[in-house]
Image: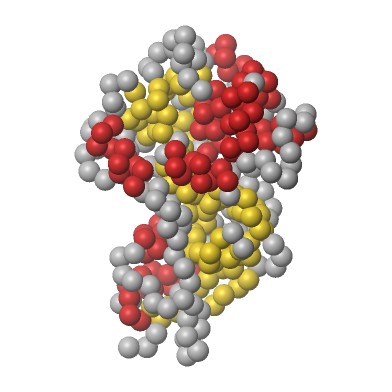
Amino acid sequence: MIRPGLSSSSGCRRVAGLILPLLLGCATPRSTEIGGSVPPNSRIDDAIAIAIPVLERTDPEAADRWRRWLRTPGSRRSIRGTDDHPMSVRTLPGIFEATAYAAPILDARRHRDAVHRHPILGDPVDVTDPRALPVRRSVAELAGISIPVLGWIADGLDAYLAEVNGSTALRFADGRIECLAWSRTNEREYTSLGRRLVEIGLADADNIDLDVIRARHREDPDAVEGLMLDNDRVVFFEVVPESAWPRASTGVRLIPRHAVAVDPEVIPLGSVLLLEGADLPPTVMVAIDIGGAIRGRRLDLYFGAGDEALRAAGRLKTAIRVSILEPAIRSP
């Protein structure tokens, strides 16, 4: 996502004025619509190239077919296919729910102060058993003592959403930015904040989204942050190079608007998908991520990094049809 200028092994560190336009530029909404030929060197090429090593673990033959497709001149490629060389389109039965996520870029401090009180936790690598890691209610007393802290931020909801998203970047007062990726969790049960807000009557199930959650947090931060404690699952981060950020749980980079988190019990990781719905134009995505809350017939689309991407992601909740694609190559 971030191009030139990686400094040393400390991860994604660069003056904010240089890195932010690149970060936010990659969050620009864009989709690959279905039909006709695909131009070479497009972002769908990048997405499929990243999917291939993941697909090799689940379907090596499909990985090889996509590899050959990428080597084929653009004029001979087809996403939809033709009558002579139809693409294999296997539509999964039923309707799926689609939501979206994004990587936040958060103002942070190296040390806790009166304003910056919420920790972004590092991975205590000396604790080998994830079940020995703390639950959320224990974090406040252990952060910075037995659990490393990578940065302190001012907004408790932002700290919580960074965990839900699994990827974030911290912008420090000196203008430097560090890119963080999900390292592991304490493997406890995940409890949805949105569901808890609905259960106690602070939100309506029919229209809850990120904007609603933020509004409730502004109105009563103590109440919302109290509900966060009901989620025992805690995410621990590690600093990663800019060339690997944002990083999916499979270890590959996320491509905005072309990467999606799935339940691998329903959709094999590495699958190239066609998503279609009333609120989503026909779009090619690659299944290269998973999530604690992504279970069953649900997908979570990656929208990019920064505030604009977060706003767009927080508003997406729609029913879609899902198909798994196989490539077609036209004759010369």
Q: Residue at x 53, y 71 (%)?
A: 325
Say if 168 sits above or below 33 in the image: above
Res 251 seen here: no
Say if 35 sits above or below 14 in the image: below
Q: Residue 278: x and y, percent?
A: 62, 63
Q: Quadrant of residue 136?
A: top right
Q: Residue at x 46, y 55 (%)?
A: 257
Q: Residue 71: x and y, percent?
A: 32, 72
23 sits to left or right of 230: left
**Split into 4 quadrants, where in the image is the C terminus?**
bottom left
106 sits to left or right of 90: left
Q: Residue at x 30, y 44 (%)?
A: 22
Q: Residue 193: x and y, percent?
A: 66, 33
Q: Residue 165: x and y, percent?
A: 52, 39
Q: What colour scheme governs how the chains and residues are painted in the rendered image of this protein? A: secondary structure
201 sits to left or right of 144: right
Q: Residue at x 37, y 17 (%)?
A: 110
